[in-house]
């Protein structure tokens, strides 16, 4: 479904990704882990076309996408839910959803989104800027779902949210994953990410350093403490 | 002291001029808000609109034709400029944008000067705008009353497009975060072209409407450019409502202060702008966080 082959990405002159590769099969949930600054967000942004890789290739559903603009990539059914959520603050929750649905031939009906996220239904006329952090995150995910994408890239969906809300969103993601779309998830909350994922990639300083199943990661506490951190290790066990 | 009649008459002038300024400024503000572009060619586009009115009205005497042709000329001009030059400057520092749009403005002004000369052209008031209305306390030229209606209707049209269509939804979202708009599958570049063209057309159509009241000369856009920038700063960068309210404020300020001493009217708008910036740095309706 997604094949990233030795991409190199830069911010201006600073080289951030070094020959990063990764493969994601259809209907799979893959976790992308690593310390702060490891290059996870940059990898997702490069896949989604926000940043163009200076070398390397990215194929999605068999098509090369590394030279396409982000809107063309989104139209192929690849949807990034960015780290900063990027909800339109001056648009209402419902307008955020309608905007997202504009360029898809078969979007989810808005009512189906509201059935999935009852909290958003209550807040449909509230401006994006007036939503709580948890509501904004739900809206960010809902805005991806309404486009019925084939592949969703989730960048730290649980960041900065209260534990209760994380549990809610986590079970939602679990249901989502079972329903079919392929998911790549980046998370600091390693326990949450590993409970969803079938396979794991770890990045360090912009390099691939680990690839395997959550099980093999558990069996490899050295990789865990070296590339993710002791806190994360305890959380994961 | 001016009489009540004089005062009301000037207040009316301010209102008419304010709606016109609102129309020009709304174009400037959506271009800035969506594209982040400081467009110093906006005044020249207003001027091109006025000259289109001059040509059309002296040939065919049809104001409606002048309005449509004014919009059409600006559409063509805007598409050409955006594709040819402007689009390469969206991500450049403001001083680059300022220089290039100022350069374009000089070229437009000189091109018009080469075609029509520097002398002031008279554009006749349309027949249905001739005459004077008696408001009891004061008499008032009919055309200026009609300007309020025409500019008001155009602003309402622009408002409907911005707030009640998909294009408007995209533009409002684009003002906030063009990258995210792209991530939702919407071709941002094409949207930028549309926004630039709509903004330029607002200036051009304002030029058509204003032409019968003004000395139509190649340099006529400059004061409007300056005043429109004041309006946009007062109203808040990127805010349509801010452009309308700011336009009316500046229109009234210019009119009412000139009742006492025209020399102070420019000073007055800068004083009010400074005051508003001190109390509310993002302008009356500006979005939080947008510089
Ligand atoms: N906009 C940017 N400009 C310059 N450097 C950046 C930018 N964004 C991130 N970086 C740098 O790129 C590296 C990778 O960042 P990022 O991909 O955000 O890491 P992660 O998501 O894994 O925390 C870091 O060293 C970071 O400082
Ligand atoms: Mg990140």
Image: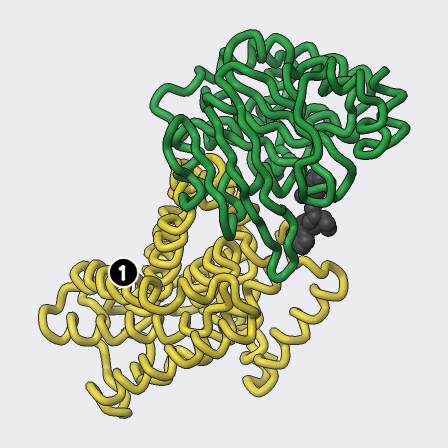
User: Where is A67 relative to A75, above or below?
Assistant: below
Ligand 1 within 8 Å of disc 1? The answer is no
In the rendered image, residue B87, in percent from the top left (x then y), is placed at 40, 62
- Mark 1 lies on a secondary structure that is helix
- Identify the residue at image location x=39%, y=37%: A64
* Residue sitting nearer the eye, A72 or B66: A72
The residue closer to the viewer here, B40 or A28, is A28
Q: How many marks?
A: 1
Q: Position of residue B212 (x, y in %)?
A: 28, 74
Whether residue A176 appears in this view of the structure is yes
Figure quadrant of residue A164: top right
Q: Which chain is yellow?
A: B
State whether residue B160 appears in this view.
Answer: no
Quadrant in which the C terminus of chain A appears: top right
Q: Residue at x 73, y 25 (%)?
A: A158
Name the spot of residue A114 as percent of width and height, x first: 56, 14
The chain under label 1 reads: B
Q: Which residue position is annotated with label 1?
A: B75
Relative placement, left or right, of B38 versus A89 is left
Q: Nearer the viewer, residue B21 or B44?
A: B44
**Which chain does green denote in the image?**
A
Name the image colouring: by chain
Does residue B76 sit above or below B242 in this rendering? below
Mark 1 burial class by Cα count in 10 Å: few <14, some 14-19, many 20+: many
Residue shown at the point (55%, 79%) measured from the top left: B259
Q: Where is residue A5 drawn, in percent x and y?
A: 51, 37
Q: Nearer the viewer, residue B44 or B234?
A: B44
């Amino acid at each position: 479904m997604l094949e990233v082959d030795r991409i190199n990405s830069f911010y201006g002159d600073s080289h951030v990704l070094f020959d990063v590769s990764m493969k994601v099969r259809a209907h799979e949930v893959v976790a992308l882990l690593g310390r702060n600054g490891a290059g996870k967000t940059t990898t997702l942004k490069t896949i989604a076309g926000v940043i163009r890789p200076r070398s390397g290739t990215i194929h999605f559903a068999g098509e090369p996408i590394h030279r396409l603009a982000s809107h063309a990539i989104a139209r192929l059914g690849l949807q990034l839910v960015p780290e900063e959520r990027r909800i339109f603050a001056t648009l209402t929750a419902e307008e955020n959803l309608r905007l997202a649905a504009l360029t898809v031939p078969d979007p989810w009906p808005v009512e189906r989104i509201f059935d999935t996220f009852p909290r958003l239904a209550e807040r449909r006329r509230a401006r994006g800027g007036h939503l709580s952090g948890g509501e904004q995150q739900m809206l960010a995910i809902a805005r991806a779902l309404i486009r019925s994408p084939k592949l969703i890239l989730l960048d730290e969906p649980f960041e900065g949210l209260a534990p209760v809300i994380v549990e809610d969103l986590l079970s939602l993601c679990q249901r989502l994953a079972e329903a079919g779309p392929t998911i790549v998830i980046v998370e600091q909350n390693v326990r949450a990410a590993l409970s969803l994922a079938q396979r794991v990639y770890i990045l360090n300083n912009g390099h691939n350093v680990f690839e395997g199943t959550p099980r093999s990661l558990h069996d490899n506490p050295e990789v865990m403490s070296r590339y993710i951190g002791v806190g994360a290790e305890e959380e994961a066990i | 002291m001016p009489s009540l009649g004089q005062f009301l008459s000037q207040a009316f002038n301010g209102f008419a001029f304010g709606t016109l300024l609102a129309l020009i400024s709304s174009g400037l503000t959506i271009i800035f808000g969506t594209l982040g572009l400081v467009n110093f060619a906006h005044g020249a586009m207003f001027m091109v609109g006025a000259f289109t009115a001059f040509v059309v009205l002296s040939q065919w005497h049809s104001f409606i034709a002048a309005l449509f042709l004014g919009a059409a000329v600006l559409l063509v001009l805007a598409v050409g400029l955006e594709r040819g030059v402007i689009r390469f400057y969206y991500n450049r520092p403001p001083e680059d944008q300022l220089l290039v749009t100022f350069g374009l403005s000089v070229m437009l002004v000189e091109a018009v000067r080469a075609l029509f000369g520097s002398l002031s052209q008279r554009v006749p008031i349309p027949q249905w705008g001739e005459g004077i209305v008696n408001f009891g306390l004061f008499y008032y030229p009919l055309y200026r009353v009609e300007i309020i209606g025409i500019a008001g209707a155009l602003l309402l049209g622009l408002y409907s497009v911005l707030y009640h269509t998909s294009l408007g939804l995209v533009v409002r979202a684009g003002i906030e975060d063009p990258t995210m708009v792209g991530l939702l599958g919407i071709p941002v570049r094409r949207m930028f072209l549309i926004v630039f063209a709509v903004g330029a057309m607002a200036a051009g159509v304002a030029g058509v409407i204003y032409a019968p009241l003004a000395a139509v000369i190649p340099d006529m856009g400059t004061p409007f450019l300056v005043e429109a920038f004041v309006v946009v700063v007062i109203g808040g960068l990127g805010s349509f409502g801010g452009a309308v309210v700011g336009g009316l404020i500046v229109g009234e300020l210019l009119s009412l202060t000139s009742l006492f001493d025209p020399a102070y009217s420019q000073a007055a708008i800068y004083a009010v702008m400074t005051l508003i910036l001190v109390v509310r740095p993002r302008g009356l309706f500006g979005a939080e966080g947008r510089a």
